[in-house]
Amino acid sequence: MISKKLEAAINAQINKEIYSAYFYLSMSAYCTSKDLDGFANFFTVQNQEETFHAMKLYNFLLV
Ligand SMILES: [Fe+2]
């Protein structure tokens, strides 16, 4: 059992990870709209990475 303080800190970090994921997704969409497919792919991969971080912390909180 983790403390409420640590739980709140992890929740805040999950929020930041998801914010970053959306931010990368928006940059990917922008690059796609400008026919910059290589950059779009890079930002899509970053989106997946940040989502992975968020889910790792999410699953940690649930165990
Ligand atoms: Fe991250």
Image (cartoon, rainbow, N blue to C red):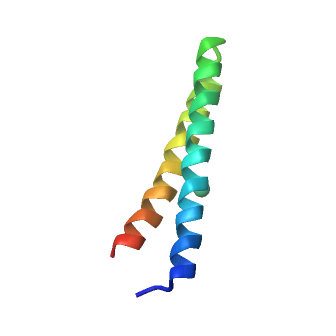
**Is 61 above or below relative to 46?**
below
Q: Position of residue 43 (x, y in %)?
A: 60, 34
Ligand 1, seen in the image, is in the quarter at bottom right
Give the residue furthest to the front: 4
Q: Position of residue 39 (x, y in %)?
A: 65, 27
Residue nearer the viewer, 32 or 7: 7
Give the residue furthest to the left: 63
Q: Position of residue 42 (x, y in %)?
A: 60, 34
Quadrant housing the N terminus: bottom left
Q: Residue at x 60, y 29 (%)?
A: 26
Quadrant housing the C terminus: bottom left
**Is 9 above or below relative to 18?**
below
Left or right side of 14 for 35: right
Residue nearer the viewer, 53 or 12: 12
Q: Position of residue 30 (x, y in %)?
A: 64, 20
Q: Residue at x 46, y 54 (%)?
A: 52
Q: Residue at x 54, y 49 (%)?
A: 18
Left or right side of 54 for 38: right
- The number of discs equals 0
**Is 28 above or below relative to 23?**
above
